[in-house]
Image (spheres, coloured by chain):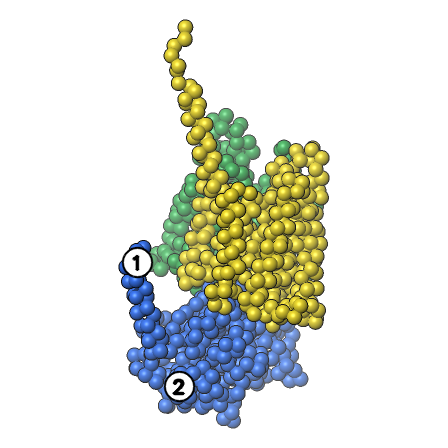
């Protein structure tokens, strides 16, 4: 990584570790909330940004993860059992969702995932015996480990921070491996990728499954953060917001999810007093962004350097084209 | 049996509104490859335009005409020039995302700028109830169905029988050949957008009396329109009609005979089945994938 | 910035901080946590209007114990998770009392925070479960279903032999449907259809059709305001002429506005109505109309009387202290003569439930007409 990138990452990490100690309950809550959405968005970034799939049903996995943990906690099992269980459940369901993705293309896939999300949401809402229906599940406990209780807001924040960093490093490793390159090949031109010997079937399924697992972990953490879940945060609108978070941040950029989640989660909270206007501005910003910056906010540095390069190249061309005197 | 017929006819009325929204959606896709995620909001906005006119004292039909004109300008011309034209060259997804953003902006713009509360809306049709051979049908249902069907059939006749209409179809099928043949492609595309705006305004006046005008009234309508369009066949305008009616009727039947709680799942299930077994839709034609 | 300007800024900030601190001690802070968007918009907005009207009046009359009330309003979007976060924030901000949310589903979740922060929390929610959680800090501003439904059940028993129940699928609706089912069990009224609908639902054709199919001789409609309006319109559209019975949310002012003619003939048991034949109520109706240009519904009354109940409690406790106020509220008896702001005599029990008279209302010609007055349960 370049020096500037390394330095800013370090500063960011330090801020993440020390800033919340200066905040009150609500501020810490907000940061934890943000980190959870970062995890979910990272997963979606893999599916959408790196592998080029069209997934508009991400909130469903978020919800499956949350309900898995909530139900298990209510049944008396430990959070540390619930968390991997949530990831596993979502991984499996993600794989299952990948199958229709093999059969349908782009926009049909988008609608299919949308439909999937609605179906899951309906089950969450109607099957009261399992999920508590519209009443949801209340009084979800926070975990504890090695004698440390994560019940306090700050303690829970550090737990979530740790998990986020771990997952980010894992993702980075994945993306730098040959698998990562296979994903981008899948995104850019699937048929050509197949002709090069990449098993697009497996990679498509995997991109859904891994993305889903990330969302599942995020959902599990969400359940213990808010300590109450109902079907509302897992509907199609939430999926669309998650998708927009990835798009605004920059699909295919590693830090895209962080930026996107900040825009989608933190800004609305700060601007709570102007909520409706904020969303109006957000919607308009997305439209404008698509016209000026279809690759998301993080594409700005790339754009600037691309412009600079093209200007230098034209300057060179212009210089080379100047007549050097008439040769006879 | 009369119960079934009642549910059936009531479903036809709701379905015809879905058909209007789905038809516009399909036309946009065919003519310009635009997937308009804000289709539901395109119905919501004329409803509020009409409320604005009504509050200013204009009678209902005048308000409707004014809203139609405004819709064509804003939802037709402005939408095309401002959003679709710049993004056209980037492919489908940027347009999808932009229309998602547009729908959020429109919804919250109305919510913040006008009101978050629902508004009553006058009914175009008489509040009468008719008893036909034991089946009770309401005047509104009959009126809605007739009006919507008339619009759909007129639109299809326009597309099939008039020169402009056939030019629009030519643009939809093969844009390059169409321009080579001297058809004014951008104008034909604009006409498509204009028709969509008109259909949406019509849907608004039909649906708002029962739904009440609220900033989020477009959300579920938009969803049903997408599914209906795909079920019917994305590249066939008659498919939109069929898809809308099927969804409307099946929803009603399912809500009454199976479970009201899973009513919204009906459109979904039909959609999933169609997509897995006949992805081009019930009336659509198979489309090859270009490499 | 150079040293001098830095010093100036610091000085200014310190002065402001002191002023702020001083001011804080001079005001009573409350937060209004209400639904300003989503399905609960109608309820939340009117509740907030009532609260703000009362606060304005109280401040103009000199405040409580000599201090003015300062209030902030925030939007829960009818989302319980959001309500919870906002309640947390209000607790952090050191308010004396919290008003709202109105929706039962939201208060059921957010009250864990006001309990943790030990802040008196007034709610407009009506679900029975709200006061069954062992929370000493939650207080109703309207009847709970356990107080209102016995009266309702008695009325239904006289009007219907086969009842279709249409309810909304949330805490409020389900709570009501469960309570009613229990109360009607073994009585002369049979429930022949149990139809659930969604919050924010727009299309009621299937629900009405199902009710018609069941051959019920009356419908009990228990949905929130917006949905009630749509349901009534659909019932009219499909030619339903048999009785439609409900509770306050069926015949509220906003519902009548939205449903128009379709609301005529609906009968409801209401705890609060601006058309009650009580002089104080009519005064409130006029004041609200003057302030907001529209007629209040029961949510506006809830908010308005809620603030005056708080005032009475503070005066009883004698100090601006969260715990003391909460304790003073349990077992309080507030007389409308001495505290005209509460409009009707009201008393609270140890769970936060309130007891008052109530009314049977029918909608005639677009207005609520009180057909009968029912005494408070404890007054039998």
Is the residue marked by circle 1 packed among few (<14), some (14-19), or many (20+) residues within 10 Å? few
Q: Measured from the top left, where is residue A208 in percent x and y?
A: 66, 49
Q: Measured from the top left, where is residue C309 in percent x and y?
A: 42, 83
Q: Chain of mark 2?
A: C
Residue at 71% from the left image edge and 69% from the top image edge? A77
Q: Is residue B286 visible?
A: yes
Q: Earlier in the sequence, mark 2 or mark 1?
A: 1
What colour denotes chain B?
A: green
Residue at 71% from the left image edge and 42% from the top image edge? A201
The residue closer to the viewer here, B29 or A97, is A97
Chain ID for yellow: A
Rendered image: mark on residue B116: none
The residue closer to the viewer here, A47 or A288, is A47
Q: Measured from the top left, where is residue B84 in percent x and y?
A: 47, 41
Residue most extreme to the bottom: C380
Q: Circle 1 — which element?
A: helix
Chain ID for blue: C
Residue at 46% from the left image edge and 45% from the top image edge? A289
Give the CA separation, mark 2 to mark 1: 45 Å
Residue B59 sits in quarter = bottom left
On the image, numbered disc 1 is attached to which residue?
A: C3
Residue at 46% from the left image edge and 61% from the top image edge? A269
Q: Measured from the top left, where is residue C1 in percent x and y?
A: 32, 55
On the image, numbered disc 2 is attached to which residue?
A: C319
Q: Is residue C257 above or below residue C180?
A: above
Is the residue marked by circle 2 packed among few (<14), some (14-19), or many (20+) residues within 10 Å? few
Q: Is residue B108 visible?
A: no
Q: Circle 2 — which element?
A: loop
User: Mark 1 and mark 2 in contact (Cβ < 8 Å)?
Assistant: no
Residue A277 sits in quarter = bottom left
Q: Is B153 on the left or on the right of C178, as rendered?
A: left
């Amino acid at each position: 990584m370049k020096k500037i990138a390394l330095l800013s990452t370090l500063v960011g990490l330090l801020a993440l570790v020390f800033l919340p100690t200066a905040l009150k309950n609500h501020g810490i809550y907000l940061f934890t909330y943000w980190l959870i959405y970062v995890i979910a968005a990272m997963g979606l970034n893999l599916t959408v940004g790196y592998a080029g799939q069209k997934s508009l049903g991400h909130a469903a996995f978020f919800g499956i993860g949350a309900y898995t943990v909530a139900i298990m906690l209510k049944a008396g099992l430990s959070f540390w059992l619930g968390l991997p269980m949530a990831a596993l459940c979502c991984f499996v369901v993600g794989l299952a969702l990948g199958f229709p993705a093999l059969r349908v293309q782009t926009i049909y896939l988008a609608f299919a995932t949308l439909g999937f999300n609605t179906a899951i949401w309906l089950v969450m809402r109607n099957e009261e015996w399992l999920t508590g229906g519209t009443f949801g599940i209340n009084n979800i406990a926070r975990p504890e480990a090695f004698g440390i209780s994560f019940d306090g807001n700050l303690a829970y924040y550090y737990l979530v921070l740790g998990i986020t960093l771990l997952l980010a490093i894992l993702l980075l490793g994945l993306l730098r491996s040959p698998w990562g390159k296979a994903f981008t090949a899948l995104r850019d031109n699937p048929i050509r990728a197949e002709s090069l010997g990449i098993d697009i079937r497996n990679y498509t399924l995997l991109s859904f499954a891994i993305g889903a697992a990330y969302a599942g972990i995020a959902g599990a953490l969400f359940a213990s953060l808010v300590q109450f879940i109902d079907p509302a945060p897992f509907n199609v609108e939430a999926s669309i917001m998650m998708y927009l978070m990835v798009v605004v941040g920059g699909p295919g950029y590693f830090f895209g999810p962080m930026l996107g989640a900040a825009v989608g989660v933190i800004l609305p909270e700060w601007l709570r007093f102007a909520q409706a206007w904020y969303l109006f501005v957000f919607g308009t910003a997305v439209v404008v962004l698509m016209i000026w910056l279809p690759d998301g906010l993080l594409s700005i540095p790339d754009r600037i350097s691309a412009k600079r390069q093209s200007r230098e190249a034209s300057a060179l061309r212009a210089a080379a084209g100047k007549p050097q005197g008439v040769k006879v | 049996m009369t119960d079934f017929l009642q549910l059936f006819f009531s479903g036809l009325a709701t379905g015809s509104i879905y058909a209007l929204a789905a038809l516009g959606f399909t036309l946009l896709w065919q003519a310009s490859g635009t997937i308009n995620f804000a289709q539901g909001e395109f119905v919501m906005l004329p409803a509020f335009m009409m409320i604005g006119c009504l509050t200013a004292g204009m009678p209902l039909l005048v308000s409707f005409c004014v809203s139609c004109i405004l819709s064509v300008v804003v939802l037709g011309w402005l939408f095309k020039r401002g959003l679709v034209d710049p993004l056209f060259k980037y492919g489908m997804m940027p347009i999808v995302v932009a229309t998602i953003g547009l729908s959020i902006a429109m919804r919250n713009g109305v919510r913040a700028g006008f009101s978050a509360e629902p508004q009553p809306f006058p009914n175009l049709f008489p509040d009468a109830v008719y008893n036909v051979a034991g089946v009770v049908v309401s005047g509104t249902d009959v009126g809605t169905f007739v009006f919507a069907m008339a619009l759909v059939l007129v639109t299809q006749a326009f597309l099939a029988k008039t020169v402009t209409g056939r030019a629009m179809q030519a643009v939809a099928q093969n844009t390059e050949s169409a321009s080579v043949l001297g058809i004014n492609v951008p104008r034909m595309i604009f006409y498509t957008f204009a028709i969509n705006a008109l259909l949406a305004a019509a849907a608004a006046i039909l649906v708002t009396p029962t739904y009440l005008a609220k900033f989020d009234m477009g959300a579920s309508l938009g969803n049903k329109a997408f599914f209906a369009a795909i079920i019917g066949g994305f590249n066939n305008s008659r498919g939109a009609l069929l898809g809308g009616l099927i969804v409307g009727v099946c929803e009603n039947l399912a809500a009454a005979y199976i479970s009201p709680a899973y009513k919204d799942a009906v459109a979904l299930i039909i959609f999933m089945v169609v997509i897995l077994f006949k992805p081009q839709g019930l009336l659509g034609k198979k489309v090859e994938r270009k490499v | 910035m150079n040293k001098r300007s830095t010093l100036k800024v610091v000085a200014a900030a310190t002065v402001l901080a002191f002023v702020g601190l001083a001011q804080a001690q001079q005001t009573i802070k409350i937060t209004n946590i209400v639904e300003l968007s989503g399905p609960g918009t109608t309820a939340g907005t009117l509740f907030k209007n009532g609260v703000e009207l009362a606060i304005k009046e109280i401040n103009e009359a000199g405040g409580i114990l000599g201090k003015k009330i300062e209030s902030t309003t925030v939007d829960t979007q009818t989302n319980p998770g959001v309500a919870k976060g906002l309640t947390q924030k209000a607790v952090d901000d050191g308010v004396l009392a919290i008003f709202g949310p109105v929706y039962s589903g939201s208060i059921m979740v957010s009250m864990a925070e006001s309990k943790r922060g030990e802040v008196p929390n007034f709610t407009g929610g009506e679900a029975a479960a709200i006061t069954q959680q062992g929370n000493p800090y939650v207080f109703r501003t309207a009847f709970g279903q356990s107080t209102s439904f016995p009266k309702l059940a008695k009325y239904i028993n006289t009007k219907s032999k086969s009842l279709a129940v249409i309810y909304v699928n949330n805490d409020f609706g389900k709570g009501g449907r469960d309570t009613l089912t229990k109360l009607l069990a073994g009585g002369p009224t049979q429930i022949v259809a149990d139809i659930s609908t969604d919050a924010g639902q727009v299309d009621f054709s299937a629900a009405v059709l199902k009710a018609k199919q069941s051959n019920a001789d009356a419908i009990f409609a228990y949905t929130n305001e917006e949905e009630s309006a749509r349901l009534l319109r659909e019932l009219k559209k499909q030619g339903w002429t048999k009785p439609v019975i409900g509770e306050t949310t069926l015949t509220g002012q906003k519902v009548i506005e939205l449903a128009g003619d379709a609301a005529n003939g609906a009968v409801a048991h209401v705890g609060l109505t601006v058309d009650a034949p009580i002089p104080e109520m009519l005064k409130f109706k006029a004041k609200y109309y003057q302030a907001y240009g529209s007629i209040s519904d029961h949510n506006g009354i809830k908010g308005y009387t809620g603030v005056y109940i708080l005032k009475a409690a503070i005066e009883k406790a004698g100090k601006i202290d969260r715990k003391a106020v909460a304790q003073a509220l349990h077992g309080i008896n507030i007389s409308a003569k001495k505290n005209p702001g509460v409009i009707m005599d009201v008393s609270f029990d140890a769970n936060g439930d309130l007891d008052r008279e109530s009314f049977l209302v029918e909608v005639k010609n677009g207005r609520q007409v009180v057909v009968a007055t029912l005494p408070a349960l404890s007054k039998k």
